[in-house]
Each structure stands twice: as C-alpha cells, then as structure tokens.
Image (cartoon, grey):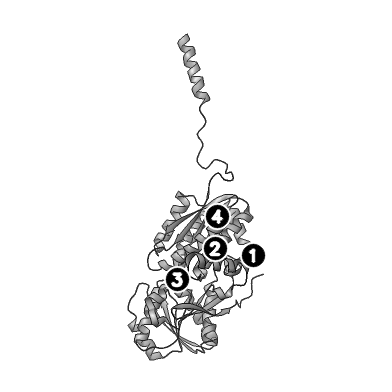
Amino acid sequence: MKKIWGFMLLLSVLMSGCKPKKIPGSEERKPGMESIKIGVILPMTGNVSGFGQQTWLGIQMAQKEKPKVLGQKVELLLCDEKSDKTESANCAQRLIQKDQVIAVLGSVPSSNTMAIAAVTEENKVPHVTPSSTDPLVTQGKRYVFRACFVDTFQGKVLARFAVENLKARSAALLTDVAQDYSAGLSRYFTQQFQKLGGTVTELKYQSMEQEFSAQLTQIRRLKPDVLVVTGYYPEIALIARQARDLGIQTPILAGDGAEDSRLVEIGGEAVEGLYFSTHFDEQMATTEIQFHYTKLFRETYNKPIDGLAALGIDAYLILLDAMERAGAQDREKIRDALDRTEKFQGVTGEITLIKGDAVKPAVVRKVEKGGFHYVTTIAPTLPSPQ
C-alpha cells in the first residue's frame, strides 16, 4: 500500500510540473516578444549587382533611423537573388515559408520582381519593390506595390527630353529582349516619340552580350539624332564604348537602368555626356526628410545618394508607415494600408499609390567628369485617377 501511495504521489508531482506543449505560432504576440521580420530580395551578386548593393545601402540606413515598428524591432532578412529570375522566386519561397516574414521588399530588375510577385501574390504577402518600373509588376496584383514611377511615364520622359532638349527627330533604339523592363520602356518611348513627330528604328540585343558591332554599324549608316538604350548599365557602357570606337558621336539617352557607378567604371570616357532618366538627385531636395537623408548618406558612405538608394529608403519607410497605420502584424491589414498610401513624404518626393503604382516626377541626369549631374525634372502629365 505504501508503494502505491508513493507512486501516486510521484505521479501527482510530475503531472503538476507538466504544461501543454504550445503549438508554434499559436502564442499571442506581445510587444517586445520577438522581432518583426521583413524579407529583402536584391541582386547582391551577378550581372546587375550594383543595383542591389546601392538599394541595400538605402534600406539599411532607413532601418538604422527607424529600427522599430509597432513597438518591436525590425529584423531584415536579406536574400541574394543573384540577378536571376528563378533565384528571385526561390528567395521569396524561402522567406515566406521558412522564415515567416510579414512582408517583402524587392527586387530591382522588373523581370525578377515579377517572379517574386507571383509568389507573394499567391501567399497574400504585402510586397513593395523599390525600383521595378515595368507596368506588369503590379498589373492585376492586390499585394504588390512600388515606390517608383512606371515605364509608361518614363518612356514619355525620355521621348520628351529627346525632342525638347536634344531637338531629336530620329532615334535609333537598342532594346534588351531578355529584359521585360527594356522591352516595355522601348515600347512606351517609341509610342511617345512617334506622337511627337519622330521616327524610330529599333535594333535588339540580349543581356550579357559583349559585342554590338552589327547593330552599331547599321546605326552609323542611319545617322540618327539620338541613340536610345533601354537596358542596364553593363551593356549600356559597352555599347557606348563600341559606338564611340566606330566614330558614332550621336548623343546617348538611357533609362534608369543606367544609374550605377559601374556605368562609368566600364564605359570610361565613352559615357561622358550620356543622359539618363532616374528617380532622384540631391538638387531636388526641398523637404526636411530629403535634406536629412541626403546629408546622412554622404556622412555614412562618403558619396552622394543616388536614385536606387533613395528608393530603398522610401520602400522601407512606406512599408513601415503602412504597418503603423494597420496597427497590427496582419498581412491583410498591412496590404489595405499600403493601398491607402497618400501624399507620403519620402526621399524621392511626395508619393501617392494608385493601384499599386507611385505617381511622382522623374529626373534627368548627365554623366560629366565621371559623375552624375542634375539636368532637369519632368513632372507626370497624366491626370491621377479619381
């Protein structure tokens, strides 16, 4: 009998010390209990690694200035998509399924961002791209937003600048058929340039090509008023070098895919005088937030801020602003708050999101003495939807 009572007593003690095992994710989230995870997908290596590295500098700076949201620390989980569309989608899957991020920032190349968007949309995860400009990135999407303008507008900016500032009436257009961004920007440039009375001859190439003599020989025969290249900086720089080597002195005009210091590193003197549209220049600064971040960027990195870094800051701040307005770590509420973003004061200017797209002006910069210099600002001409 003593043995039985002893056993019962031991069992009682053991049972009183046992607690039901909590199911992961079932705990109520309390302020300070854990960090808020945000996934960041950028091309840190590969063909356009300069884009990712500059954007990451901006995002890191924004996090340093605003490290908390909803009373909790923000944890950024960076995934290198290696300038590859497939790896972009893989990054999104890992961050959402394994790391359980509340939202995603990225990427830069539009094709890669569209691969990410397919995953974020399926999983209903809020997604903000800093700088992917192809209209298809957000088209038909509920959870995908952008901090930058759209190529329908950028194409008009390039055409207007070519006609009004460069007095061009004929254009030779080089399109990277491997990039959705380039194909779309070329299409919108052509439409607007022709509306303004100009003629366009389009020739094509693909990312990672090194030799452009066939296309440039044809362009030399055409003697266009302007050479427009809608791809990314590695190929733009090589095209400029080879064009100048062939004696082509035609002004070169590009989109925001040209903005990276490696344009000058690769292109050297050949890119002197090249114009490109982009998202920000220090001379645009008029507000407190613009002055603050442009000054802080110079002090931190010992160089001027560019459009990509500025958009990285804005994408982060737009997302956190939406989270604060949502008032909870609820993806659907965050999505709804993003959709209601209006007159947000960012580094690149005032941002209102309409169907996921930012309505804002564009800047034209010029390569001079190895640096990028402000030329002009072109405001949107399309009326905002009611």
Please name which of the two marks, 2 or 4, marks the residue nearer to the observer.
Answer: 4
The residue wearing badge 2 is 315
Please name which of the two marks, 2 or 1, marks the residue nearer to the observer.
Answer: 2
The residue wearing badge 1 is 342
Answer yes or no: is residue 335 visible.
Answer: no
Instruction: State if disc 4 and disc 2 touch (CB < 8 Å).
Output: no
Q: Secondary structure at mark 4?
A: loop
> What amino acid is at disc 1?
Glu
Measure the C-alpha gap from mark 2 to mark 3.
Answer: 22 Å
Q: Reply above or below: 361 against 224.
A: above
> What amino acid is at disc 3?
Asp
Q: Residues within 10 Å of mark 4 (few under 14, many from 20)?
A: some
Q: Earlier in the sequence, mark 1 or mark 3?
A: 3
- Name the image quarter holding residue 196: bottom right
The residue wearing badge 3 is 180
**Picture residue at 39% right of the left edge, 82% below the top:** 269
Q: Secondary structure at mark 3?
A: helix
Measure the C-alpha gap from mark 2 to mark 4.
Answer: 14 Å
The residue wearing badge 4 is 67
Please name which of the two marks, 3 or 4, marks the residue nearer to the observer.
Answer: 4
Instruction: State if disc 4 and disc 3 touch (CB < 8 Å).
Output: no
Q: Earlier in the sequence, mark 2 or mark 1?
A: 2
Answer yes or no: is residue 67 visible.
Answer: yes
Q: Position of residue 30 (x, y in %)?
A: 59, 43
Q: Residues within 10 Å of mark 3 (few under 14, many from 20)?
A: many
Q: Position of residue 206 (x, y in %)?
A: 37, 74
Q: Earlier in the sequence, mark 3 or mark 4?
A: 4
